[in-house]
């Protein structure tokens, strides 16, 4: 076990990383980036300390033509048994990232008593596995950021780390606050797209067989699903690839990837984490 401070010992941290996209404004809560150049982005969320799933996604994305930058939508840690290696893996890549509720819980920004029993146990365990530097990295992640015409937030714009965008009223509330054409979210672990229309919003599951063509005049909220703990009945890791050169405003390709679940489960059990966290991986729920 690696030693480190408890979450309560962490000071507030405001950090900036060079990612080649030209940071024009930075704070602990919100970051804004200059207009993005032609590029490919790997869009991922909810890794939840599942290194096997994370590595499978990275390998699949490389095999599909690669990417220039990772857009990470929160919850790098929690639930599974490799928080430190997952942090190291993300930090080794050119990336921009935001915080999720589990990232906040291990750094003392959110009370883990708000979680269910298994999630709380994993958050407390995780906090004591991480070094001070790893905790400081998580503590320095903003809750909201904009990159070009994309807003990134883990939950929603009215509650950045805790609200699930799984209802029309929640989607409409975020559309009302959205200052860009597109919003990328995580948290629910469901690969969904909300489309704004007059007087409401429509929702659909992302389609792995057909890329989503973006149009700056059609506002969308898109969830790539979860890398490390999918909950839509499909156990495979879920993610998106964004290609800015295709179509009017780019395309989003949804992909699902098999990974070594048995190893991820074995690590969870060996760490003494709740059995339910290992069992649910194979169910995709």
Image (cartoon, rainbow, N blue to C red):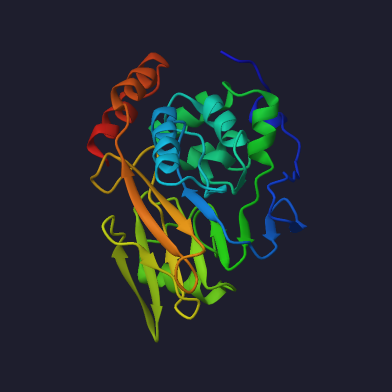
Q: Is residue 13 above or below residue 218?
A: above
In percent of the image, x 63 and y 58: which residue is there? 145
Which of 256 and 146 lies nearest the eye of the viewer? 256
Which quadrant: the N terminus?
top right
Q: Is residue 220 above or below residue 191?
A: below
Q: Residue furthest bottom?
A: 198
Residue 175 horizontal side relative to residue 202, left or right: right
In percent of the image, x 31 and y 24: which residue is there? 275
Which quadrant: the C terminus?
top left
In percent of the image, x 37 and y 80: which residue is there? 200
Give the x, y percent position of residue 40. Answer: 52, 54
Give the x, y percent position of residue 266. Answer: 33, 18
Which of 106 and 90 lies nearest the eye of the viewer? 90
Q: Quadrant of residue 280?
A: top left
Q: Is residue 209 above or below residue 257?
A: below
Residue 241 horizontal side relative to residue 257, left or right: right
User: How many labels sit on residues?
Assistant: 0
Give the x, y percent position of residue 181. Answer: 52, 73
Q: Quadrant of residue 160?
A: bottom right
Residue 56 horizontal side relative to residue 282, left or right: right
Which of 236 and 280 lies nearest the eye of the viewer? 236
């Amino acid at each position: 076990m690696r030693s480190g401070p408890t979450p309560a010992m962490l000071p507030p941290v405001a950090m900036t990383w060079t990612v080649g996209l030209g940071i024009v404004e930075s704070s602990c809560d919100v970051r804004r980036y200059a207009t993005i150049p032609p590029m490919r982005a790997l869009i991922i969320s909810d890794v939840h300390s599942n290194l096997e799933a994370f590595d499978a996604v990275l390998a699949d994305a490389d095999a599909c033509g690669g990417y220039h930058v990772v857009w990470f939508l929160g919850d790098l840690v929690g639930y599974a048994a490799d928080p430190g290696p997952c942090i190291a893996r993300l930090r080794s890549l050119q990336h921009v990232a935001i915080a999720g509720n589990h990232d906040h819980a291990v750094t003392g920004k959110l009370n883990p008593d708000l979680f269910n029993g298994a999630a709380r146990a994993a958050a407390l365990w995780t906090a004591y596995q991480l070094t001070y530097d790893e905790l400081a990295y998580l503590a320095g992640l903003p809750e909201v950021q904009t990159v070009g015409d994309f807003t990134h937030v883990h939950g929603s714009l009215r509650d950045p780390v805790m609200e699930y965008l799984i209802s029309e009223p929640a989607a409409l509330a975020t559309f009302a606050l959205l200052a860009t054409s597109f919003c990328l979210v995580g948290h629910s672990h469901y690969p969904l797209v909300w489309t704004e229309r007059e007087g409401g919003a429509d929702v659909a599951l992302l389609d792995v067989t057909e890329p989503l063509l973006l149009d700056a005049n059609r506002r969308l909220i898109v969830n790539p699903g979860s890398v490390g703990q999918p909950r839509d009945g499909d156990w495979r890791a879920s993610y998106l690839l964004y290609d800015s050169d295709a179509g009017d405003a780019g395309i989003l390709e949804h992909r699902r990837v098999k990974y070594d679940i048995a190893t991820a489960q074995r690590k969870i059990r060996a760490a003494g984490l709740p059995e339910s966290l290992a069992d649910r991986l194979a169910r995709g729920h």
